Image (cartoon, rainbow, N blue to C red):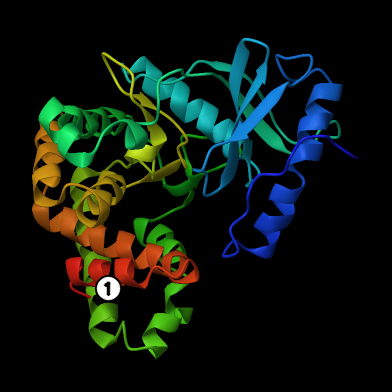
Amino acid sequence: MSSPYLKPHTPSWKTTEEHEFRDKVPAYIQEALDRNLLPLKAISEISYFGTGENSVVAKISEGRRSFILRFAFMDGLVDHEVFFMKAWEKTGVRVPQIISHHCTDSQVSVSFIVYEYVQEPLLSDALTAEEMIRSGISREIGRTSALMHTLKGKNFGYPSQANPRRGVFASLREELEEWLSLNERCVLYEKKVLNDNSRKRVADAIGVLEMDMVRIAIPSLTHNDFRPYNMFYTRPKITIFDPFPRITHPMMCLGGTILKAMLEGGGDAEVSEILKGYREIGEVDENVLDAAIVLRVMSSLPSWYAKGRMKKIEKAVKVARL
């Protein structure tokens, strides 16, 4: 199906499947319009967000009316996102209003969500790390993360199709091993960036998280990409956006947030503020968090390598003592 809409930019490092998916986005938009599945009769303007590892996110407009349209790369992700976002909203977390959502069927061969358009900028564009620390936003990020983690699920990993509160893996180890499945094939071992110590650090980290999971007993509903580029700078609360839903140990989610601050944010000062905010609601064991950071680094290395981010890799390897 032909479409007048431009394709989103696709970085060269993305997989063949992602390239094909993103190339089809203009046709998906046209299909959704033709079947009256969008809150607009026509689109006069479209602009794509730079974020979206597993999705394509765009602002669509007709005159003065605008919405956020998010196409999901993975089947089932839309249902899970809607469930997680609505559940978090009930705890007091601010999320964009969900206007509608559609799952893949014979009408439109892709899943998508239509959100209200949030006028305020992304937090990553609005404030520097230093400004987030001074204004109390860093502490708010930690507090919001802990509030989201108060919601609990069953089992581990991606939510199942039948029950979005239940993960597809029976154990945390199964989930973590799947999460890290690319690492043994990672070229960084061949290039000596990683070594046998790296493998030991990973094995020890999984053991630490397993033992702590026995203590806390129930995994959390986690955002899995809770960073300033997935938050809108709204007041009096930040607005969270674009989760990659996963049911897991809460430190795996917090570890990703902390790692972002350590590598690209305000360093120790920002980390301290995030943790102060988190501890207002939840608990943080430094050893367990350290283990989660090790695993978040390892899970990210193949993607960073594909993007050519060697300096980031070197810094992360030092942070995680790999």
> Would residue 57 be visible to someone looking at this image?
yes
Specify the amino acid type for callout 1. Answer: Glu
Give x and y (percent) for residue 262. 20, 54
Q: In which quadrant of the rendered view does residue 310 lie?
A: bottom left
Q: In which quadrant of the rendered view does residue 37 lie?
A: top right
Q: Tell me if 173 is positioned left or right of 198 in this view.
A: right
Give x and y (percent) for residue 186. 45, 78
Image: 44 above or below 312 = above
Can you name the residue that lies furthest to the right here?
1
> Would residue 222 be visible to someone looking at this image?
no
What residue appears at the point 59 percent right and 32 percent down from the top-left corner? 79
Q: Which residue matches tag 1?
A: 314
Image: 271 above or below 48 = below
Give x and y (percent) for residue 196. 27, 87
What residue appears at the point 66 percent right and 32 percent down from the top-left corner? 112
Q: Tell me if 286 is positioned left or right of 239 in this view.
A: left
- Closer to the camera in the image, 77 or 57: 57
- Closer to the camera in the image, 286 or 314: 314
Give x and y (percent) for residue 52. 52, 44
Image: 91 above or below 21 = above
Mark 1: give few (<14), some (14-19) or many (20+) Cα within 10 Å.
few
- Element assignment for label 1: helix
Q: Tell me if 141 is positioned left or right of 308 in this view.
A: left
What residue appears at the point 83 percent right and 30 percent down from the top-left corner? 31
Q: Tell me if 202 is positioned left or right of 100 in this view.
A: left
